[in-house]
Each structure stands twice: as structure tokens, then as C-alpha cells.
Image: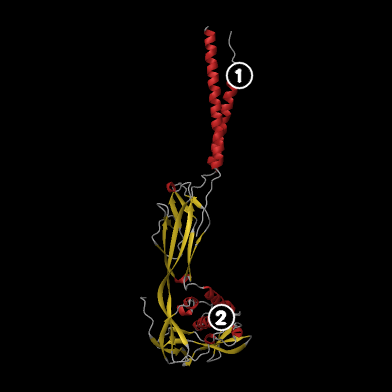
Amino acid sequence: MEENKNNKQKRGVVDFSVVLSFVVAIFAVISLAVFGIVSNQGTSISYAADEEESLPDEFIFEVLERNGNPVQIKYSKGGSWEGYTVPMYVIRNTTKPVFCVQAHVDPGIGENYTKEKEIDDYGLLYLLNNTYANGVKITDATGEYADYVEGWVTQTAIWMYLYETNEGAAEHAIENPEDIKQATKLGLNLSGETIYDPGYNIYDKYVAPLVEKAKKATSDVMLNAKLENETITPSEDKKYYFTSLITVTGDPSSALKSYDVTVSGIEGAVVVDENGSELGTTIQPGTKFYVRVPADKVTDEAQKVSISIKGTFNTLTGNYYKGAANHQRAVSVKAAEKTDSKNMEVIFKAPDTGMNKVQTIYFIGLIVLLCGVGIVYANAKPVQIKQ
């Protein structure tokens, strides 16, 4: 009687162990399958890109002089000096340069010039903003004649740009434009002295690139923003996620005064520098940044962070000026501030936490599965009953 009771108890234990083992094994298999699917989740990202003074209402148009003679710069093509020259014009009693918009038209030296309409040709403004007109050095010329070289490049670029973008217009016609494109050195008309002989084609090196950029200009200042790569990265302490590095540049770079950055879309998103320190709204040129988001705000659902960047440039505005009838039209400019903006969008999504965790889960699941199989095997063996 007692022996039958013990046998029933043992069979009950065996039956329960078998059931429990199968439950554990099934759970392990399901866990492996589920985490195998989850481990394929990834990260996605997308991104969209002196106190001002008014220009004078009028001024006296003068040619720059050197040793009592007007400064005129000529070019050499194939070793011979050509007749095409570029005078250096200024506002009387100043060294402020003035540039012409009509080649080979009587400039009206000593004449009173009056303000016409504001310059609305972005290509022309681009040239004025990126050359000697704005104090920007273009060439490698040095020494006492460097400004003359810069002036020749600036004036030639203005004339050639207007000539090429106003095809057939008598106002912007140029004699022998193909000859000008072969300029190899510059000299002073007043003395025949060579002032610049770099050993290469001056037009191709300096003037042509300016003209091509001017043709494409939609603004006289341009802001550029670039995301280094398409990933988001957790911090070492797992408290934050970061975008890749974002670089902001201006064209012209020397004109970029500062830029402002605002972010929105996820609570707690801020802008930080390369050392992880939070940046203010206004950032100095040359400073790269990341967007940082608290880890607890990043979920499995894709969330968009909008990044708005507005650059402030020291630049120019200008006007056309006109003298007497049939005389040269001129342009002059003044310092000003302008802005240009770029917008970017970054998608934050909780990334995979890494293969180590997945491997750990698989390993634990495998152990549980083997343990379950072992229990099943052990309890399925016949029980030896002592006589």
C-alpha cells in the first residue's frame, strides 16, 4: 500500500517536470525567434540642405593717379601688349574704387555722377562682393602694384560677365573678347612697366571662375550646411544620441559674420560643440556642431528634428550711377548686412543596441532550451524501485 502511494507521487513529479520542461523549451524558442526579428531594426536619417553709411546721392568721378599720371592697366597676349586697358576709377578725394559697367565708353572724368536705381543683378553683386571692390584679394600678386592687379581682374570680370549675360546688347559690347581671354601678364600704360607676370593665363586662373560663379548666383551671399554622415550615435554613458558633425560655411567665407541655429521636433534637443558643450543661439564662423537629444526621448518610432540655420554676412549693397548722356554708367557699393538660410531635417529612431545583447539573449535562450531538454530526458527514464 505504502509502495503504491510512493510510486504515484513519483509519477506525479515526473509528469509535472515533463510539462514544465516543454513550457520552458517553447518559451526559449519563442524568445529566440522574437529577438532574432527585433535585431534587424536599424537607424534611418534624412536631411533636407563700421556703422552703415548711405551711398552718396552724387559724387565726382575721377581716375586714380600715380606720379601725376592716370593709372591704366594693359595686358599682354603672346608677348605683345594689346590696346585694351583698364583705368582705375575712384570717388574724388577718396581711395574708394568705382567700377564701370560699359567697356570702352567715355567715363566722364571729373563729371558729377548721380545715383540711379539699386543694383538688382545678383551676378554683378556677387562680383562686387567677392573682389577688390570689397577688399577681397583674388590673385597671388604682391608688392606695390598688387591693388592694380586686383583692380584689373575685378573690372575685367564685371565687363565679361555683363557681355556674356547680355548677348548682343550694344551697352555691354567688348572689343576682341577672345584676345582678352589670352592675357598672360599686366603692365602700366603710363610707363610700359610690367607689374604682374605670373607665368600662366591670368584670365583662366582668376577672371573666368568669377564670371562662371556670377552667372550661377541667386544671391550675392550664400550659406552652406553639410551633415558629415547619415548616422546617429549614442554617448558613452547612453544618456544621449548625437547627429554626425554639421559644418556651416559661407560664400564668400570671409564675409560670414555669424550664424544662428534653432532646433525643434524632439523635447530636449540642443546644439553642442565638438567638446559636447552647449552652444548659444548665435555661433561664430568655423564652429562645427552636433544636435544632441536625450536618450529617453528617442523611441522606436521615427521622429524628425528640424534644424534651421541663418547666416549673417558682412556684404554690400550698391547703386548704378550716371553722368552726362552717352557717358559711362558706374557702380559703387556700401557695407551692409545680409542673411541667407538653410534648413535640415534629421530623423531620430532608437537604434539597435548592438550584437552583444542579441548574442547574450540567444545564449541564454539556448541554455534554457538545453536545460529543458535535459529535464525532459532525465524524467522520461524508468524509475528504479527498490525491492
Regarding mark 1 in the picture, which secondary structure is present there? loop
Residue position marked by numbered label 1 in the rendering? 381
Choose between 216 and 291: the one closer to the eye: 216
Q: Find the residue positioned furthest to the top.
A: 1
Residue extending farthest right:
78
The colour style of the image is secondary structure
Q: Position of residue 333 (x, y in %)?
A: 43, 80
Locate residue 265, reporting x and y percent: 42, 54
Q: Quadrant of residue 273?
A: bottom left
Is residue 330 placed above or below 275 in the rendered structure?
below
Which residue is painted at 46% across and 62% down in the image? 343
Above-or-below relation of 96 to 361: below
Q: Position of residue 9 (x, y in %)?
A: 52, 14
Front label number (1 vs 2): 2
Looking at the picture, tell me which residue is in the foreground, 147 or 48: 48
Q: What x and y, as percent, mark residue 306?
A: 45, 57
Which residue in the protein does label 2 denote?
164
Q: Of the residues shown, which amino acid type is indicated by label 2?
A: Glu
Numbered disc total: 2
Local SS, label 2: helix
Q: Amino acid at mark 1?
A: Lys
For this rendering, which residue is in front, 48 or 56?
Answer: 48
As drawn, the label of residue 122 is: none
Name which of mark 1 and mark 2 comes first in the sequence. Answer: 2
> Does residue 227 lie above or below 50 as drawn?
above
Is disc 1 surrounded by few (<14), some (14 to 19) or many (20+) residues within 10 Å? Answer: few
Does residue 26 show up?
A: yes
Question: Mark 2 packing: few (<14 Cα in 10 Å), some, or many (20+)?
Answer: some
Q: Residue shown at 37%/80% (left/top)?
A: 54
- Report the quarter where the C terminus lies: top right
Could you give the CA–CA distance between mark 1 and mark 2, rounded to whole angstroms? 97 Å
Q: Is residue 274 visible?
A: no
